[in-house]
């Protein structure tokens, strides 16, 4: 079969013809129709991920066919029994286990969830890891309600956009930030109440004034700008952190945190029950994950390049062989 | 009556003979038996508190007699209706409203709670503000359970010691930090599993190794040392922040926060129902708040001086007139 395989020393992911996977007891073969990229895949290619293994098929997100049914793949492996955090044996599909950038994948049957009927295979593939991360940080960690005022920082990334769509679907008032005015304009078309460029002088003061402050903020940047998020918090606000692309957080005021009774809540991926709840939420609200672009397996290097540049608005999807 | 009154320009609190307070509709007169100092009182004397008013009687903590019964004073004013945070009109007794460093205080009757029978007047006076702060940060914010491993930073201060006593009473394993080896030794006598000096090289690595890491950490320092607390967290840990004596937090790793699913939870004082629950907890566990020292109203300047130096281990109490 054809698959995107990680090889040490290669700077670009490449398509290879490899042997079909072997099915063991309790496992099934899914014919993949589509997969989607995550930042994680780019970091693996750049060698910035723990436990990278030579010869592994990449990819955490996928959707396909098994026994004639359309199925989503739950990318969790060994979350464990505690809903509050993953176990020490937790892994994500696509490193070190073989992933979804291939024509076929072998998985335990319990990793498969029926695809909501309103989703295409490409939309379904865009959902798993980003949707799981967005769902947990918004609902389980920040306990979002429909009356909360929400800020999603760095709109355009896969998780940020899914969090944005989930919060809108719940009926919350949602604001966004970006460095790119076009992404802000795009988010407004989708329903954002407003947006601010975090590269502008005093943007957080303007945003606080315009919005009235936030009950829930979802961030994956950290860095020096994080303290601006704290200053935009209303009393009792929750800030969910699911990434740290801008490095360590500086100049964080304990006084603001304790006086406003703020909660700063770290979150990563989610449990299997978070995954099931997320798919139910997408189904019941008929949410279509925003797709930025679709590439074939042959075009995978272009897909990675687009992700690296950070220009995308939504998920970057790979279309694979199997027809539904 | 005699009272400790705040006067602009005076560097020390001083005892004055003033007129008895006037009782209005719905209010009662409490004959104070004891009061206790908080850092807040020292900050008011130093002009480092918002809304300081000339001629006000100081003091947030007090216990006394009304209608022949021993009563504790709830120092909350206008917490409001949301249990998650105080209202914008929230105030603490003792500035801007007249406080407890006096022979009499006039209060709405709903600010009075029966003193648990096992407490002396001095112990009762040591409880309100510190107990409320400790209770909320530990139980409502950090959701402490008996199986959690706990670290209380800066042991010796009023809130820290009450949090320490509450966590021990619940049956949790509790560790402490201090710059002072004598305070650590004292905490061990009271039941601490161990303690580390945060002034030592690599103290947090040693403490993590010795303890196995923490589920709950309670801190009022912040500053550069805060990131050491994060590094001692187990997955799913909660860090409660109720102060920031060492200034802004630096070099906080978002990666540690999201990967370990850590919660950083700001907390200040507590609601009226937190207060009632705290008094019930102290009553049912027969906790005796640790008293550092007892002064008369005439010795109030010495009491403030001891608080300023930070040498205390427990609450600094003022003994007042009324006999029980």
Image (cartoon, coloured by chain):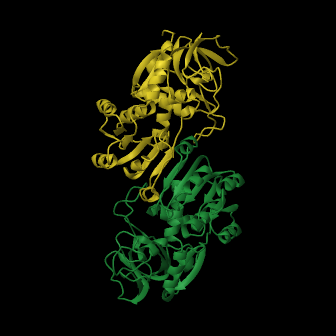
Chain colours: A green, B yellow
Tell me which residue sits at (61%, 26%) in the image: B95
Q: Quadrant of residue B52?
A: top right
In the rendered picture of this protein, how many numbered marks are placed on residues?
A: 0
Is residue B6 found left or right of A37 in the rendered image? right
Q: Nearer the viewer, residue A275 or B193?
A: B193
Q: Nearer the viewer, residue B43 or A136?
A: B43
Q: Quadrant of residue A188?
A: bottom right
Q: Position of residue A123 (x, y in %)?
A: 57, 76
Is residue B180 found left or right of B58 in the rendered image? left
Give above or below for A299 relative to B142: below
Q: Position of residue B140 (x, y in %)?
A: 49, 40
Q: Position of residue B207 (x, y in %)?
A: 31, 46
Q: Nearer the viewer, residue B269 or B306?
A: B306
Q: Nearer the viewer, residue A253 or B199?
A: B199
* Residue at the outermost left position: B210
Tell me which residue sits at (60%, 66%) in the image: A155
Residue B172 showing in the rendered view? no
Residue A129 showing in the rendered view? yes
Give above or below for B321 relative to B268: above
* Residue at the outermost bottom position: A17
Is residue A11 found left or right of B97 in the rendered image? left
Q: Position of residue B141 (x, y in %)?
A: 49, 43
Tell me which residue sits at (47%, 26%) in the image: B127
* Quadrant in the picture for the N terminus of chain A: bottom left
């Amino acid at each position: 079969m054809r698959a995107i395989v990680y090889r040490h020393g290669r700077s670009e992911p490449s398509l290879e013809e490899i042997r079909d996977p072997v099915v063991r007891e309790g496992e099934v073969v899914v014919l993949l129709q589509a997969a989607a990229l995550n930042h994680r895949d780019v970091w693996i290619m750049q060698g910035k991920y723990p436990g990278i293994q030579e010869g592994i098929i990449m990819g955490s997100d996928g959707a396909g066919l098994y026994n004639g049914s359309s199925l989503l793949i739950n990318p969790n492996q060994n979350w464990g029994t505690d809903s509050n955090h993953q176990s020490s044996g937790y892994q994500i599909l696509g490193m070190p286990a073989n992933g979804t950038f291939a024509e076929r994948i072998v998985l335990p049957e319990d990793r498969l969830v029926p695809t909501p009927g309103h989703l295409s295979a490409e939309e379904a593939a865009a959902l798993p890891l980003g949707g799981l991360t967005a769902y947990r940080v918004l609902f389980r960690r920040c306990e979002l309600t429909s009356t909360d005022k929400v800020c999603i920082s760095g709109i355009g990334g896969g998780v940020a956009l899914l969090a944005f769509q989930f919060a809108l679907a719940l009926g919350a008032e949602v604001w966004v930030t970006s460095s790119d005015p076009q992404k802000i304009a795009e988010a407004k078309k989708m329903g954002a109440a407003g947006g601010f460029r975090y590269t502008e002088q005093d943007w957080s003061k303007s945003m606080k004034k315009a919005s009235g402050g936030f009950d829930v903020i979802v961030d994956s940047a950290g860095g020096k700008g994080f303290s601006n998020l704290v200053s935009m918090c209303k009393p009792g606000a929750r800030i969910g952190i699911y990434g740290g692309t801008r490095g360590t957080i500086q100049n964080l005021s304990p006084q603001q945190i304790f006086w406003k009774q703020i909660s700063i809540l770290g979150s990563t991926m989610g449990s299997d029950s978070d995954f099931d709840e997320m798919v139910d939420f997408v189904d019941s609200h008929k949410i279509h994950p925003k797709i930025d672009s679709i590439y074939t397996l042959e075009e995978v290097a272009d897909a990675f390049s687009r992700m690296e540049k950070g220009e995308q608005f939504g998920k970057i999807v790979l279309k694979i062989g199997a027809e539904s």
